[in-house]
Amino acid sequence: MTGWIVLGVLVLVIALVVLYIIVIYNGFVAMKNSIDRDWSNIDVMLKQRYDELQKLIKVCEGYMQHEQQTLEAVVKARSEVSKAGSENQKMAAQNALSETLKSLFMVVERYPDLKADTGFRQLSNRITELEDQIADRRELVNAAVTIYNTRLDQFPDMIVARLFNFPARTLWNIDPAHRQDVKVSFSRT
């Protein structure tokens, strides 16, 4: 009789451990898929910005022949975005593109006719709107990644994470060079 009780308790403990592992595993899978979905949502907005940017460049080219260097930097940064493969490369390329856009909009301040152009205003407003949405989504991705990475390091979840090889994910960070103050000059030199 006591042998059956011991066996029953042992089976119950094993069943609970297996159930716990299944629950933790499924939680990691759900979080991983959520992060992937969030990245895909950002990719959709980045693609929209990428497409709108080409239109904005075309509008600016006619007005800004003297600012060829700025336009070339935007075109180059846009090109780097399409070449990026890994999450880290995408982040770096997108951060560089955001910085060149800031430079472009600073240069635009010198062209009142361009700022008055309806097409330019619509495109720049759309890109600004997309930039704001992308920033919001980056925060969501970073929040999800932080929760996921924290669970990877917490006991006992870390045992399941290591058992099934769940890798840590990368937070969306900006290049340290982009944290420096932007130099603004109102002279035409």
Image: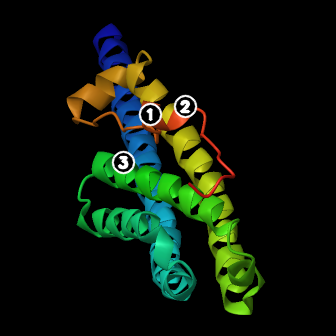
Per the model, the C-alpha gap separating discs 1 and 2 is 6 Å
Residue 15, located in which quarter of the rendered image?
top left
Q: Secondary structure at mark 1?
A: helix
Residue 133, located in which quarter of the rendered image?
bottom right
Q: Which mark is residue 122?
A: none
**Pointer 2: what residue?**
180
Left or right, 24 with respect to 11, comes to right
Q: Which mark is residue 92?
A: 3
Residue 19, located in which quarter of the rendered image?
top left
Q: Closer to us: mark 3 or mark 1? A: 1
Residue at the image point whose x is 31% and y is 30% from the top: 161
Residue 156 screen position, x and y as percent: 40, 18
Per the model, the C-alpha gap separating discs 2 and 3 is 16 Å
Per the model, the C-alpha gap separating discs 3 and 1 is 11 Å
Are discs 2 and 3 less than 8 Å apart at CB?
no
Are discs 1 and 2 less than 8 Å apart at CB?
yes
**Pointer 1: what residue?**
177
Q: Secondary structure at mark 3?
A: helix
Are discs 3 and 1 less than 8 Å apart at CB?
no
Going from N to C along the chain, the mark reached first, 2 or 3, is 3
